[in-house]
Image: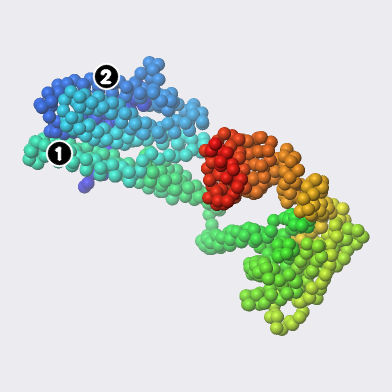
Amino acid sequence: MMISIQKFETWAIKPFFAIFNFISERITYTFAIAFTTSLGGFIIAAYIALFLYATVRFDVSNTGQDFVILFSGMTLFIYAPLYYIHFGLLYNAGVPCFTKRLSLINTYIVHNTLHQTIDDTEAVRLLEALEHLPRDNMTAALIYPSIVMAGVCVYEAIKGAFTNALFLLLGISSAIFIYVFLTYIVAELLSGRMRRKIKWLLVKRGISFNERYILSIRGKFIFINIMVLVAMLELGLMIYYNNYDIFSPIPILFIVITGFIVFVILFFYLLSIEESLSEIESAAIDLARGGSGSLFLPYLDKELINTSKGFLAAAYEVNDIRRNLEQKVEERTKELNQALTALKEKNDLIAKELKIAASIQQGILPQTPVVFNAIKVIAYNRASSDIGGDLYDIIRMPNDCLGILIADVSGHGIPAALISTMVKISFHESCRKYLLPRRIFADVNNQLVNIIRTQEYATVFFMVIFPTYDVMYANGSHRKALVCKRNSGRLEYWDTGGIFLGALPNEEIGGLFEDNFGILEPGDRVFLYTDGLPESRNWNNEEFGDERVEKLLLETLDMPIDDAKEYIIEQWEKFLGGTPPRDDMTFVLLELDPIMHKALQHREKGQELYAQKKYTLAIDELKRGVIMNPEDMTSLLLLARSYIYTRRYSNAVVHLTEYVAKKPDDSMAQYLLAIAQYKLHNYEEAYKAAAHSLALRPSYIPALYVMAAICASLHKTNEAIEYCNKILEADPGNIKAQKLLQKLKH
């Protein structure tokens, strides 16, 4: 019968642990790790001694005795003391370890026993320190032997033969390479039990922690292969340089020692895998028998840590299900629960997809408020389920016209949502071609009839607001628009004849689409809404009704439009009293804002005066417009330009600074700011603004000239000349650039 790795452990690994425990109980935990892992250095020393004996010609360089003395001395008086003190040889005598992590380990692990009084934070830190311990040991095993290697190689290169130094470097490097890996896997093995003990302690206390990995099983396997290749290379060099027969004593002994080292490393490598698989098997059996299935592997390989995390996640889910299930259920109930679980998963998937669809649907609705040409538009949409068939849109049309759309698609859910999206797309397409609502209706109807193959249709109200505030509108079997006139305080109703869209082709309905005219005056409001508002019912089955809608609109006439929207929603929800809406509810409220309208008039007057070069008068008009509507960027920029023309550069800087803060990518504004700062002799600020303008429009000649002038004022002559040359490359006849260039060169 074959002996498994774990059986071999009983007479190989346990005595090894006995040595480690003996030292740990009498000195320190980290020193015990370092000392035990360094024992592998003896067999590696024999391995490398054979290679050096066969390849290094100390008889030629006559430095053999010096090498032995130097190598032994540096090992005994540099490597060993530093390495062992690094890991806490003198920690109990008051000499700290070389790193805080090692000192932390020795503080809480005394005589190979973990202090149970350690607090939660320190326990997490201690776990992290133990996870880094194999890597820290590996690092030290690399640094200190490398010091010895550097000393003997440099000495041999200076005093002996350079070829000998190369072989020394190759041989000792390969030995360090093997030694580093061996110290890592031994330290990983020795510290694994303590890591697992701390993890159990943290789990019992309910403290979360993150398991870290250092290397991977694949990485270790690659190392072993590299080590074998290096050993084969060294064996070849030994045979080549000494003409050894392959069966002579030195090569045979080298092969035996190499094989033993490979065996030891493979043993530890396979041991980590077998122990981990055994732990996983035990945890799975424990979980199957009703236990917690807790699993904490003692090794730090990436694959093992990830497997442990995945198993723990699965065990947590299993235990969570157990806690929520009945202790005992009949077989049929169990089958029913399984069916219900599968159904719930499908339902959850559908619900998740519906939420995504709802998010997409909300994304295609324009965000409000929207302000255009003193018209302020605000809207509200609420679907009765995750997604609905109501739609509103705000469409910028040719000739500075604004289109306002509200639609209600028959039905609910996904079909209605899809058709509402088609309605939106169709209206956008038609609004690029036509301005008259009836023409737009006919074109949209034609598109929808060719797409919709079901019985669904859409009721639609659409209005076009012209720059003069004349309005043309059309109604396709939708709710009529409510228009609240500011001057009279009365309601008007905008309505036309017309049939819903998408049901019948244009040939069958003839000229049923109509449009009509209206006009908006400052302060007038228009309210568009779907059936979901007046047809809502509360717990008493009472309908909200059209009268309440009209009353709310009149009540909110003196409120700001944003407050009016919130008040309407609040009163509607108060009426429902928690009753779920039976239908989608959407409304659009728009107003010809009187203040914005007045500001727009000031802007138009200012533009007219600016065009007549009456800049002082233009400033008065534009200032009034900006005060009334600070968000009017057109007025703000024109005001700044007027200040520049009147040489009031400080005022121009104030307004241009405000403008570029909101629209930093406007190259013209940056150019104007550069001019104003230049005129005020603020050359550094002018330089920044001009650079920004040129970054946006590199070939803009006015900005290039201003930048050249600024550079000249900053005594950046070469840069100024460069900008002048750029101007002349694009415009060879530019007289201003020629004069400035001539001045700069003289």
Q: Quadrant of residue 555?
A: bottom right
Query: Which of the two residues, 615 or 568, is positioned nearer the viewer here?
Result: 615
Query: Which of the two residues, 56 or 720, is positioned nearer the viewer here?
Result: 720
Q: Quadrant of residue 352?
A: bottom right
Q: Residues within 10 Å of mark 2 (few under 14, many from 20)?
A: few
Query: Which of the two residues, 391 or 674, is positioned nearer the viewer here?
Result: 674
Check disc 1 and give the amino acid type.
Answer: Leu
Residue sitting at 22 percent across and 27 percent down? 153
Residue sitting at 30 percent across and 20 percent down? 81
Residue placed under numbered mark 1 in the picture = 237
On screen, residue 177 versus residue 740, left or right, reads: left
Give the structural element (helix, strand or loop) at label 1. helix
Give the structural element (helix, strand or loop) at label 2. helix
Residue sitting at 18 percent across and 23 percent down? 159
Residue placed under numbered mark 2 in the picture = 77
Q: Is residue 1 above or below residue 410?
A: above
Residue lying farthest to the bottom in this orientation: 508
